[in-house]
Amino acid sequence: MRDDRNKAARLPPRWFIRLAWSTHRGLYRVTGGRFGLRRAKGNRWGMMHLTTIGRRTGQQRGVILGYLDDGPNLVTLAMNGWGEGEPAWWLNLQAHPEVTVDVADGRRNVRGRAAAGDERSRLWEKWREIDAELDEFAALRSGETAVVVLEPSHRAGG
């Protein structure tokens, strides 16, 4: 019997990860959002489309992210495909926390923030229940991966 607990996490090459992201966004865009989103349920994370405002350009930027439900909040990880550095969407969200997300049941206005302390620990554990290799993948990065909470926002517009 093989013991997989001590194996190092292995990722596809970075070019492949970036190609997969681009393809997913492209399919979402050309199908008008009919392809690319799914609800989080049971032991499966969902997929959402997050629209941020570029911190330098002021232009809208979209990205497809995995998420979990936590009551009325959506929770995602700022993992950058487990590569080094912070993902651009997370840097944009920190500069402009009022954003929109499209989920399978519609659009939501949300405000993003990093979870901290006990909340971060609880939400990280929730992700670990779905992804047994989460800690191994996180260890590929030199810094801590932010757990991002998207809370309902009641701002006008969106």
Image: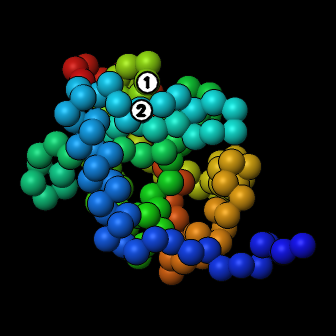
Question: Quick check: 42 above or below 127?
Answer: above
Q: Residues within 10 Å of mark 2 (few under 14, many from 20)?
A: many
Count of numbered marks: 2
* Residue 47 image label: none
Residue carrying label 2: 37
Q: Mark 1 and mark 2 in contact? Answer it, CB < 8 Å.
A: yes
Q: Position of residue 110 (x, y in %)?
A: 39, 32
Q: Earlier in the sequence, mark 1 or mark 2?
A: 2
Residue 149 in view of the camera: no
Q: Is residue 19 toward the left or the right of residue 147 in the image?
A: left
Q: Quadrant of residue 5?
A: bottom right
User: At numbered mark 2, what does the secondary structure look like: helix, strand or loop?
Assistant: loop
> Identity of the amino acid at label 1?
Ala
Image quarter of the C terminus: top left
Q: Residues within 10 Å of mark 1 (few under 14, many from 20)?
A: some
Q: Is residue 81 toward the left or the right of residue 129 in the image?
A: left
Q: Quadrant of residue 106?
A: top left
- Distance between the Cα atoms at labels 1 and 2? 6 Å
Question: Quick check: 13 above or below 66?
Answer: below
Question: Quick check: 112 above or below 55?
Answer: above
* Residue 104 image label: 1
At 28% from the left and 50% from the top, the residue drawn is 23
Question: Quick check: 34 above or below 36?
Answer: above
Q: Is residue 137 toward the left or the right of residue 156 in the image?
A: right
Q: Position of residue 107 (x, y in %)?
A: 35, 23
User: At numbered mark 1, what does the secondary structure look like: helix, strand or loop?
Assistant: loop
Residue nearer the viewer, 19 or 89: 19
> Identity of the amino acid at label 2?
Leu
Image quarter of the N terminus: bottom right
Residue at far front of view? 1
At 59% from the left and 69% from the top, the residue drawn is 137
At 58% from the left and 69% from the top, the residue drawn is 138
